[in-house]
Image (cartoon, rainbow, N blue to C red):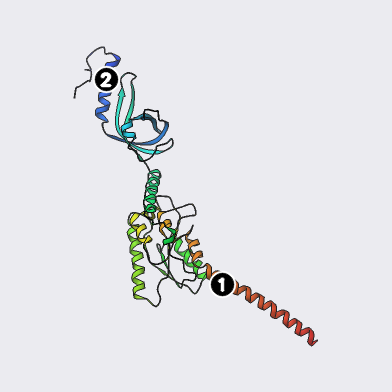
Amino acid sequence: MQNDIVEQNKEIISVGELNRSAKYLLEDAFANIAVIGEISNMSRPSSGHIYFTLKDEDGAIGCAMWRSQASKLNFRPEDGDKCILKGQVSLYPATGRYQLMVKSIEQAGSGNLMHQFEQLKKKLDSEGLFDLSKKLSIPQSPKHIGVITSSSTAAFQDILSTIQRRAPSAQVSLSPAVVQGDTAPNTIIHALNRILKFNENNQDNPIDLVLLSRGGGSIEDLWCFNNENLAREIASFPIPTISGVGHEIDFTICDFVSDMRAPTPTASAEIATEFYFQAMDKVNDLCINLKRALTDLFKTKKQKLE
């Protein structure tokens, strides 16, 4: 490579010489760099190249990405996106403006996760894993409900109290699992297999409904429920499963492959016990009506005796 650095002892240099020296130094020092920031001022001229600014609270840098690289992107960067850019810092000698020549762009943080989510969702949907015709029917009156979650979570306590209040005759068994972090998908798969093993050994009292549950959190907190291996296990699971993960606004891949989605853990327990609850309501209404009828009858008989 030709050395374009101007010697320091040269008394006078031209603007072009200065810029060419700066260009060489920048390209040598920042030949392959990764920078994180927020995209702004996105411009997409007809040439196919893209130009934009990458900024954070401390500064900003102009960026350019040639069409040959931009055409390889698997998402469309927009203003406001937080991204990781890889490329080389360079300087345009004619203007003295330095910029980042971008080779690749990746979404950072939740943006990247959402992209992965949509890609997996599209893949599994195309394979028919979300097909409604393949869903198992939720039993009206499950006798033995299996719950997969962490025993220390508020979600489990909410489920337990809801079932005990609405369907006190239903049995509840916990198949514990880690519900956050990298190890979570495998532990949930183990929890599913544990239930199958239980049913093999307890054919007179099998688990006939499974609730997969976790309370709310960020997309990162709930990310384990977007694991492909876990999704495939749930989709082929032979026992009806209700996914009650997060809050009402949270959606995970497990929601789509389960036989039913509940907006919250408590809601999953309410769905599981709805038949019991309605039956108890009807019995209570009948008791009230019977009591009222008997009271009226006694009053009538008493009046006749008098």
Disc 2 residue type?
Arg
The image quarter in which residue 209 lies? bottom left
Frontmost residue, 203 versus 17: 203
Q: Is residue 267 above or below residue 126?
A: below
Q: Is residue 246 above or below residue 291?
A: above
**Residue for badge 1:** 279
Frontmost residue, 171 versus 65: 65
Helix, strand or loop at mark 2: helix
Q: Residue furthest bottom?
A: 305
x, y percentage for residue 8? 23, 17
Callout 2 crowding tier (Cα within 10 Å): few <14, some 14–19, many ≥20 = many
Residue at 59% across, 74% down: 283
The image quarter in which residue 64 lies? top left
Using the image, tell me which numbered label, if any, was put on residue 20.
Answer: 2
Residue at 55% across, 69% down: 277
Using the image, tell me which numbered label, if any, was put on residue 29.
Answer: none
The image quarter in which residue 294 lies? bottom right
Callout 1 crowding tier (Cα within 10 Å): few <14, some 14–19, many ≥20 = some
x, y percentage for residue 29? 25, 29
Q: Is residue 306 above or below residue 1?
A: below
**Residue 16 falls left or right of residue 221:** left
Disc 1 residue type?
Ala
